[in-house]
Image (tube, coloured by chain):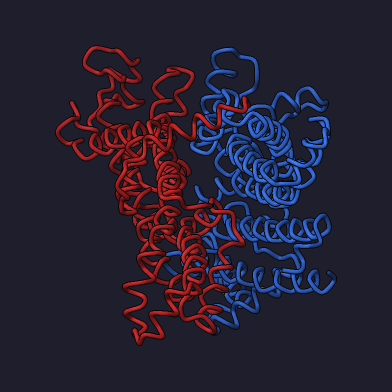
Chain colours: A red, B blue
Amino acid sequence: MAPLAGVEAATDAVAAVPAAPMSYWRTVGWRLGRDRTTLAAGGGLLVIVLAALLAPWLAPYDPSAGSIRLRLAWPGTPGHWLGTDEQGRDMLSRLLWGGRMTLVAGLTPVLVAFVVGSALGIAAGFVGRTTSTLIMRTMDIFYAFPSVLLAIAISGALGPGLANTLISLSIVFIPRVVRVAESATVQVKGLEYIAAARVSGAGMGAIVRHHLLANVLGPILVFASTQVSLSIILAAGLSFLGLGVTPPAAEWGLMLNTLRQSIYVNALVPALPGLAIFATSMAFNLLSDGLRDAMEVRG
Amino acid sequence: MWVYVGRRLLLAIPTLLGASVIVFAMVHLAPGDPIAAVMPAESSAAEIEATKRAYGFDRPLPVQYLVWLQRVAQGDLGRSIATRRPVILDVRDALANSLVLALSSSLLAFVVGIALGLLSAFRQGRLLDKLCAALAVIGVSVPHYWAGIILIIVFSVQLNWLPAMGAADDPGLLPFLRHIALPTVALALIPLGVITRVVRSAALDILNQEFVTALRAKGLAARRVFVHVLKNSAPQILTVLGLQFGFQLGGSVLVESVFSWPGTGYLLNLAIFQRDIPVLQGVILVLATFFVLLNLAVDLLQTLIDPRIARH
């Protein structure tokens, strides 16, 4: 590196910082606004989510109505811009509707894990002793399985269905959130201002509410956001194995599974549902990377 | 250090027992009568009676668990509903195939991932670094089962270069390599992304330390500096490699099912289709045990390389 390059970059950064000091969240927002990759990922994600939300109005056809005469049409066929699947159903309509299922199946478990995992982790970290041992050792058990295997174990026993997918994926993600929440809580608990609050007579509830949560929830949120992409891949993967959403519902993983028999007839259409999973998971990954950088959370 | 090793060995036992509780619970998680979860529907009354006694379904759950654990410890994982073969035989054959695939994909991911990670650390901020970062994000974001299908479409259907499914029937190295090539690449994508990222950040951490500046200041050749960096980031990299190898074994389910690779994942896939709970239990228990032992081995190996860890 040229010796001056670093200096120049540093002065650029200094000049760009506004004069008045900003609050933490405004700083985060300001940083995100300057991060073009994250903005693009966020924009892409917004399009995907809106498309899924507005599926009933955007989809040109009924996602479950097919026509035997028009099976596996190539993308670009007039009237079916993304082609048709093995039962002659419109791919664009099915991809739009499928996004709803995949997003619900992918996002809900992380949301559940964020709420339940934070509660358990903060309890373990703040109370300590027996409570901590009890919670943390129980969570350790789930680490005996790679995530895919744990999801398959639970889903395989419970049987297929969206509800069972949500249960099994929540169980996969709760222990992960608990670990992060616990270590963040232990770290913050040891800081001086918590001791100061305690000395000045604040009750346990007040300390948790006013001092602990504000400083712990940020890192937990960032961690949870990194898990969304994995959750989406796993949710679609369970459907792909026949353990998630059941046919004839439109769901990206399930569509990929039923279409993969047709790769010898039409090589392009079977690739589309996977492309949708890939794009969504990538957008979430880039967004969480940007969020982590902007919030200055390490890990 | 031996105290640490002993304590670490002891800690693995409750984890293994916990995993076995979850696997045991699968029979009871399944909707309906537990007997239906482990027996074919058309079994005779005598068979059902015998199985009931063997599993102890009429006794309290903790007793049932102990009975089951005792049988498992003797290598009896029950019989498959679909084939009535002992589960342990199927698992044994499948595990060998899965290990081969996990080894080949790990090897690919480790070599390429470490190379890319080190390259981007030493070229921090340059174009190559950015390309590697993009590759790493793609690696961790891509659904590997879809990547497998794309590989089949391109290399089997369109180009007709490589077989689309199964393991080689003919002996010899070339048929074997031709069959394992595509699943290896598909399975290597995720660990490749993860390893590239971890190696890059581990190497950067070391590069930014004072002793590296000192080495450079005293005029050490770049190649020798590189060796120092590699040696110091080894424990961290090793942990990730071990973990990723474990994930390869468990995570290969989807890729194996795409390529009909006759491993544990394919076995699991069949068992899911036939709702064959004993097979599901057997495969998952064996893989989880493997995973726990592998983590243990990585921990111990790490202490061997860097004895400072044991003192924490």
Residue A121 in percent (x, y) is at 46, 70
Q: Is residue B192 above or below residue A202?
A: above
Nearest the viewer among B54 and A3 is A3
Quarter of the image for the C terminus of chain B: give it. Answer: bottom right
Q: Is residue A92 above or below residue B24?
A: above
Q: Is residue B221 left or right of residue A75?
A: right
Q: Is any atom of residue B283 visible in this view?
A: yes
Residue found at the far left of this picture: A57
Nearest the viewer among A10 and A211 is A10
Residue B195 in percent (x, y) is at 64, 40
Quadrant of the image occupied by residue A80: top left
Nearest the viewer among A104 and A26 is A26
Which residue is drawn at the image coordinates 56% and 46% (left, top)?
A: B270
Residue B161 in percent (x, y) is at 64, 15
Residue A111 in percent (x, y) is at 35, 57
Quarter of the image for the N terminus of chain B: give it. Answer: bottom right
